[in-house]
Image (cartoon, helix red, strand yellow):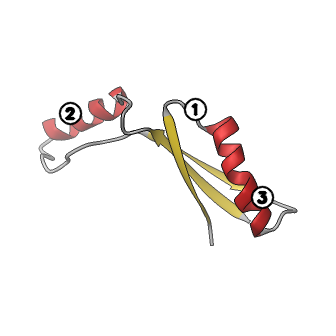
Amino acid sequence: MKVRILVSFKDSVLDPQGQTVKNALLTLGYGFVKDVRQGKVFELDLEGIDEAEARRLVPEIASKVLANPIIEKFSWDILP
C-alpha cells in the first residue's frame, strides 16, 4: 500500500519561499495568483500492515519524523 503525505507551513507561519514564488509569478503577469505556500511531499510504500494499522501509524510517522508540529501541518491519503 502506498500513502502520500503533504507537509506545509501552518497558516500562521510566514513562508518566505512561497512569497518569493508568488512575487515571481506576479512579475511574469500571473496577477490572478493570490498566494503561494511551499511544502513537501512524501510517498511511502508500506508493506506488512493493513489499512487500519496504516491509519494509526502514518499520522505518528508524519508528526514525529516528517513534519515539525510547531510550525508545520500535514495531510495524507492512501493512494490507489
Question: Is disc 3 in contact with disc 1, using a CB cutoff of under 8 Å?
Answer: no
| Nearer to us in this view, 23 or 10 | 10
Location of residue 20 by image quarter: top left
Q: Residue at x 74, y 66 (%)?
A: 1
Circle 3 residues within 10 Å: few <14, some 14–19, many ≥20: few
Disc number lying in front (2 or 1): 1
Residue at image position (75%, 60%) is 54
How busy is the neighbourhood of tag 2: few (under 14 within 10 Å), some, or many (20 plus)? some
Q: Which mark is residue 46?
A: 3
Asked which secondary structure carries label 1, the reply is loop
What is the crowding at mark 1: few (fewer than 14 residues within 10 Å), some, or many (at least 20)?
Answer: some
Q: Position of residue 66 (x, y in %)?
A: 63, 38
Q: Which x, y percent locates residue 25?
A: 21, 40
Amino acid found under the numbered disc labelled 3: Leu
* Disc 2 element: helix
Give the image location of residue 55, x and y in percent.
70, 61
The residue that label 1 is drawn on is 68
Estimate the spatial distance between the alpha carbons at disc 2 and disc 1, rounded to whole Å: 26 Å
Picture residue at 34% right of the left edge, 26% below the top:
16
Front residue of 67 and 33: 67
Kindly give the residue lying farthest to the bottom in the view shown: 80
The reply, left or right, for residue 30 in relation to residue 17 is left
In whole angstroms, how far apart are the C-alphas of marks 3 and 1? 22 Å
Q: Which residue is mark 2?
A: 23
Q: Position of residue 74 (x, y in %)?
A: 54, 47
- Tag in front: 3 or 1: 1
Mark 3 falls on what kind of element? loop
User: From the viewer's perspective, is residue 7 above or below residue 70?
Assistant: below
Badge 3 or badge 2: first in the primary sequence: 2
